Each structure stands twice: as structure tokens, then as C-alpha cells.
């Protein structure tokens, strides 16, 4: 279990670094006036779900994919990750996955600052999420690891 959690944390750090997160607040597409209570829209997906993404792991509404990654993990597993932006709050994004993965074992989550992370396991599959408040949008990373 420690190896799995360590791998999830490592992937999360790599993805955050790769997504170009910085102190600059990136405004969502079409977000004119969003900081003044105007409406925010995300625009089209910038990437697709990676090949082999499981159909039972859906993305929340009001979410667009910004990047994806597929990599081989230890013990013959494959790790598929999507980086997204969503209009949901980090709390609502986490609750979305807690709901759709209610039959999975919840390995607990953690909150650090504006970031909420979660991990769910079912058999040889795991889903990890991180949701970070980035101003007008929440940066949501979802990783599915399976054989």
C-alpha cells in the first residue's frame, strides 16, 4: 500500500509540474469579467481521454481535458491520467468521485491548502484524484491504475 500511495504522490507532483502550474492565475476561456462575478466557460477540450480509459470512470460535468498521459507502472500495471479544468469547487470535485466510487474502498484523502486529494481501490484497480483551487477554475487530475 505504501508503494501505491508513494507512486500516486509522485505522479501527482510530476503532473502538477508538467501542467505548468504557477502563481499566475490563468483565466478560463471566455471568462471575461469572471473575476467580477461574470460567467466563466471552459471552451473545448484541449486533449482527449487516453486510449484505454475505463468507461466507468467518468469526468464531472463542466470539465475540460487539458492533457493526458499513459505510462507503465510497476507489476505490469498501466497508469492513465487526465489533467482537467472544472468549474466545480475542489470539494465538489472530490465529492463527485466519492459518489461514483462509493462501492470502492476509500483509502482516505488529504487536504493541503487549496488542494484535496483522494484515493479509491477496487481489486487491482485504483483511482486517485487531486483538485486544486486555481481561481476561476479547479485544476483536477484523475489517475486510473490497473492491470
Image: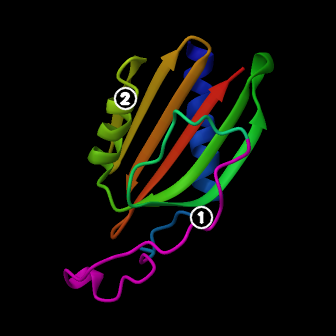
Q: Residues within 10 Å of mark 2 (few under 14, many from 20)?
A: some
Q: Is residue 92 left or right of residue 58?
A: left
Quick check: is 45 in the magenta stretch? yes
Name the image quarter holding residue 77: top right
Q: Quadrant of the C terminus?
A: top right
What numbered label is drawn on residue 76?
none
| Pick the front one: 133 or 92 | 92
Image position, residue 3 (x, y; %):
63, 17
Q: Please, which residue is most extreme toward the bottom here?
A: 32
Secondary structure of the residue carrying numbered label 1? loop
Mark positioned earlier in the residue sequence (2 or 1): 1
Secondary structure of the residue carrying numbered label 2? strand
Chain part drawn in magenta? 27-51
Identified at 62% across, 68% down, the residue is 46
Location of residue 34 with respect to 109 vertically, above or below: below
Name the image quarter holding residue 130: top left
Identified at 33% across, 70% down, the residue is 136
Instruction: Return the residue at label 1.
Output: 20
Q: Residues within 10 Å of mark 1 (few under 14, many from 20)?
A: few
The answer to whether residue 17 is seen in the rendering is yes
Instruction: Return the residue at label 2.
Output: 109
Q: Main secondary structure of the magenta part?
A: loop
Distance, label 2 to label 1, CA atoms, is 24 Å
Identified at 28% across, 46% down, the residue is 92
Name the image quarter holding residue 41: bottom left
Identified at 46% across, 51% down, the residue is 140
Amino acid at each position: 500500500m505504501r508503494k501505491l500511495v508513494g507512486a500516486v504522490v509522485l505522479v501527482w507532483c510530476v503532473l502538477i509540474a508538467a501542467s505548468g502550474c504557477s502563481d499566475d492565475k490563468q483565466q478560463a476561456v471566455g471568462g471575461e469579467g469572471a473575476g467580477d462575478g461574470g460567467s466563466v466557460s471552459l471552451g473545448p477540450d484541449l486533449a482527449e481521454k487516453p486510449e484505454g480509459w475505463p468507461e466507468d470512470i467518468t469526468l464531472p460535468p463542466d470539465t475540460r481535458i487539458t492533457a493526458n498521459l499513459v505510462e507503465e507502472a510497476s507489476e505490469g500495471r498501466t497508469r492513465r491520467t487526465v489533467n482537467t479544468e472544472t468549474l466545480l469547487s475542489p470539494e465538489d470535485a472530490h465529492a463527485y468521485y466519492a459518489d461514483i466510487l462509493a462501492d470502492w474502498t476509500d483509502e482516505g484523502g488529504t487536504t493541503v491548502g487549496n488542494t484535496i486529494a483522494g484515493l479509491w481501490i477496487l481489486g487491482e484497480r485504483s483511482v486517485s484524484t487531486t483538485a486544486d483551487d486555481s481561481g476561476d477554475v479547479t485544476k483536477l487530475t484523475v489517475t486510473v491504475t490497473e492491470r
